[in-house]
Image: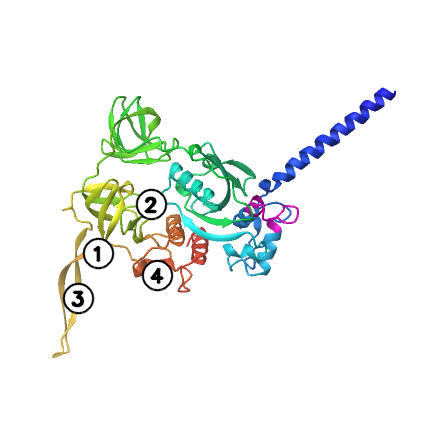
Amino acid sequence: MVRKFNKIIASFIAVIFMFCTSFTVFAADGYKDWTQGDSRWGNKTLGSCGDTMAEIGCAVTSIAILVVHSGSKSESSFNPGTLCDYLSKNGGFDNYGNVYWGAVSGLVPNFTFEKKASFSSNTKSSITNELKNYINQGYYIVMSVKYDGHWIAIDTIKNGEVYMIDPAQNKTDKLFDYYDAAGMLQVRLYKGKNLPSKIDDTSVTTPKYLTGHYITTDALNLRQSYSTSSNVLLTIPKSTTVVVTRVYNNEWGQVEYKDKTGWIYLEYTKYTESSYSYKTGNYKVNSSTGVYMRSGIGGQNSTVCLVPYNAVVNISSVSANWGKAAYNSKSGWICMEYLNYSGPASTQATTTQKVTTTTTVKTTVKTTTTTKPVTTAVTTTTNPLKKGDVNLDGKINKTDLICLNRYLAKPYETDFPTSYNMDVNNDKIIDERDAVYLFKKINKGN
């Protein structure tokens, strides 16, 4: 009986020990399980906007996670709810629920907003390397995904993989397993009480594929986009030589074959020759969000303007994968990966059509009017002065929101019509409020 009682006591102590041990482990990293929809704060509103943490609180939750992640606060006395309450009471949100990134320092003085930045390229390898550099410079990172539709916190980088803390999914997992690199546009950088752990340079992978000539090692589908779920345009036979002019996510290559331009999975190819050489002439912008024209070669140079999707530019000279471009009386350099060749330089960049109009001419000598037909050449364009039509394609849709968010991440010089179109809420200022207003406008079907 005594032995049985002792066994019961021992089992009870073991259970308590396991419970306390597991609780301690949970408490150490419990903040990584915070979600914006947590019942403790999910119904809190962001300032006076009326929207809740569960609806639009991803940025606030990501900031709160990094406050604890950096050792600037303890999760026993701080969480997304306490941060939301403080920001709401102290002007930390605008009227649309957008957070003022630096306001957190009023509550957590040793956690400071340093700057915002955008990625120079939307590829997995480039984004990974830029995030590594930010971490090694001592920054904690809040990052946009889904074309600025969502914000997450960056945890660390191991063996070339970026690990995130996602306030929407309760996940600490590989960033690129859940989100497309093309939709990763910008970051907000903070410094906290402790420095983040340095990332070993050798842990970040280098690009596996380059532009150039490849031979297919098997029959290979040419797809409309860089996804296995995308439509198949045709099948390229085995042992066919193709020219890859653009690489996406270190996996897919853009090629032209039998007058079709699409994407192939590069795992089933073999690299044969050095980088593709671009020719001069007219090119069309192939990026739905447009492409920046810059003052010099490289993404570090200042922006001249944003050239919209499907616009035709003239390339007069090429240096590596950058072309000297002319567009709408502006000149600069454009990354050739965002262009498709459309013809020699003699091809007109705009089309004209002959139309016949009737004008009424009044004479000052006699009180009579005469009419005569007049033939004029009219360039076919869409009306540029349309609030919300940021890329000037005559439509207001998600692409315009992407362009506007890119502008807010890294403003560029622009002509009046585009500036007018970006001021969606008509307050004479182009800022995050225009993005929110445009988002609501699109969702309401204009």
In the rendered image, which quarter contains the C terminus?
A: bottom left
Which residue bears the numbered disc 1? 329
- Callouts 1 and 3 close, C-beta under 8 Å: no
Query: In the image, is residue 45 part of the stretch drawn in magenta?
Result: no
Q: Would residue 138 be found to the left or right of residue 304 on screen?
A: right
| Cα–Cα span, label 4 and label 3 | 31 Å
| Cα–Cα span, label 1 and label 3 | 31 Å
Q: Which residues are magenta?
A: 65-81
Q: Amino acid at mark 2?
A: Ser
| Cα–Cα span, label 2 and label 3 | 40 Å
Say which residue appears at 53% left-offset and 41% top-offset.
166
Sequence-first disc among 1 and 2: 2
Which residue bears the numbered disc 3? 359
x, y percentage for residue 265?
34, 29
Look at discs 1 and 4 and give the one toward the viewer. 1
Q: Amino acid at mark 1?
A: Ser
Look at discs 1 and 2 and give the one toward the viewer. 1
Q: Would residue 441 be found to the left or right of residue 27 on screen?
A: left
Q: Classify 10 Å Cα crowding around label 4: few (below 14), some (14-19), many (20 and above).
A: many
Say which residue appears at 63% left-offset and 39% top-offset.
28
Q: Which disc is residue 420 wearing? A: 4
Say which residue appears at 48% left-offset and 45% top-offset.
138
Helix, strand or loop at disc 2? loop
Work out whether residue 54 or residue 142 is closer to the camera in this orientation and state it: 142
Q: Classify 10 Å Cα crowding around label 2: few (below 14), some (14-19), many (20 and above).
A: some
Q: Which disc is residue 288 wearing? A: 2
